[in-house]
Amino acid sequence: MTEQQTGVNPQEPPRSPSRSIGIGRLLIAVYGVLALAATGRSFVQIVSRFDEAPLAYSLSALAAVVYVLATIALTAPSARWYRVAWITIGFEMLGVLVVGTLSLVDPALFQHATVWSVFGSGYLFIPLVLPVLGMWWLYTHRPDTHRPATHRPAARRAS
Amino acid sequence: MIEWFSWLQLAIAVPAGVLCVVLGLLGRKPTDLTMGATLLVELLLLAQLVVALVAPLVGNEATGSLLEFYTYLISAILLPVAAGFWALIERSRWSTVILGVACLSVAVMIYRMVQIWTVQGV
């Protein structure tokens, strides 16, 4: 590692209340991947065999939309999007817990895989872990309503 | 889909992903090494697309759903590109980690693609 990398880089955005800095970037990226995965799967399910399990596949589509919304909400700095982030991530938590439990207790109900079946085991349990991390992130990065977005690093637009 | 080529892809995508994640967590900004590794993963995916398009013409048909296969393949092709642009725009350690996450996600998707192509109905 060179000195350049260990030293303070003036281009590095300052620590700010924005939710999309530092490790939050990683959270957004992983949410993006999951949104893509859920959208892709639900697209295939609905196009090729929607009649087989309208309930499970509608749920897949809903989950996909919520993941996309959550990804956007995490990148957007406003207080309104902060609320949307809580709602969507809370919905995911609820979804993965309810559908995960039901898929184990009554497998007949969810014969067709959704992103949340068996607590997201088809997705390395990422759907189960991610909302927890997301809520922790939101809790520790509450928007400062008195000082709205004074430090918006230009790089935020990158997402 | 040529099976050995897919395993080669996995053998490159997984180490590339691990390398980027580790270097990113160590605080490295995206470098030629990490960007190059991601680019290699992307090029192999494009080669895979050509293979997938040509293979059925020479009698190597997919056993599973082609729609599902191509949804995975197209999504996989988009991932390193998105992560790469992210790394170009924002040169932070987390961009390196994100390159790694993209490579590892691609690896999982290639594995699923192999299953779809070779094992009917999985």
Image: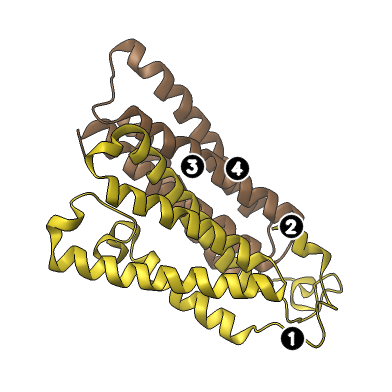
Of residues B122 and B13, the one nearer the viewer is B122
For marks 1 and 2 on the same chain, the one whose residue lies earlier in the sequence: 1
Amino acid type indicated by mark 1: Asp
Amino acid identity at mark 2: Ala
Comparing labels 4 and 2, the label whose residue is closer to the camera? 2
Callout count: 4
Of badges 2 and 3, the one in the foreground is: 2
Q: Looking at the picture, which amino acid does disc 4 mark?
A: Leu
Between the C-alphas of marks 1 and 2, the distance is 22 Å
Badge 1 element:
loop
Upstream in sequence: badge 3 or badge 4: 4
Q: Which residue is mark 2?
A: A158
The residues bearing labels 4 and 1 have C-alpha atoms spaced at a distance of 39 Å
For marks 3 and 1, give the CA distance. 38 Å
Give the image location of residue A73, x and y in percent: 62, 66
Relative side of B78 to A54, left or right: right
Horizontal relation, residue A146 to residue B63: left or right = right
Q: Colour of chain A?
A: yellow
Whether labels 3 and 1 belong to a single chain: the reply is no
| Residue type (three-letter) at the residue carrying disc 3 | Ala
Local secondary structure at mark 2: helix
Q: Which chain is brown?
A: B
What residue is disc 3 on?
Answer: B76
The residue carrying mark 1 is: A144
Q: Nearer the viewer, mark 3 or mark 1?
A: 1
**Residue A82 in the image: x percent, y percent?**
63, 74
Residue corresponding to mark 4: B39
Q: Disc 4 is attached to a residue of which chain?
A: B
Label 4 with label 2: CB-CB less than 8 Å:
no
Q: Are marks 3 and 1 in contact (CB under 8 Å)?
A: no
The residue shown at (41%, 50%) is A61
Which residue does the image show at 22% across and 49% down from the upper left? A112
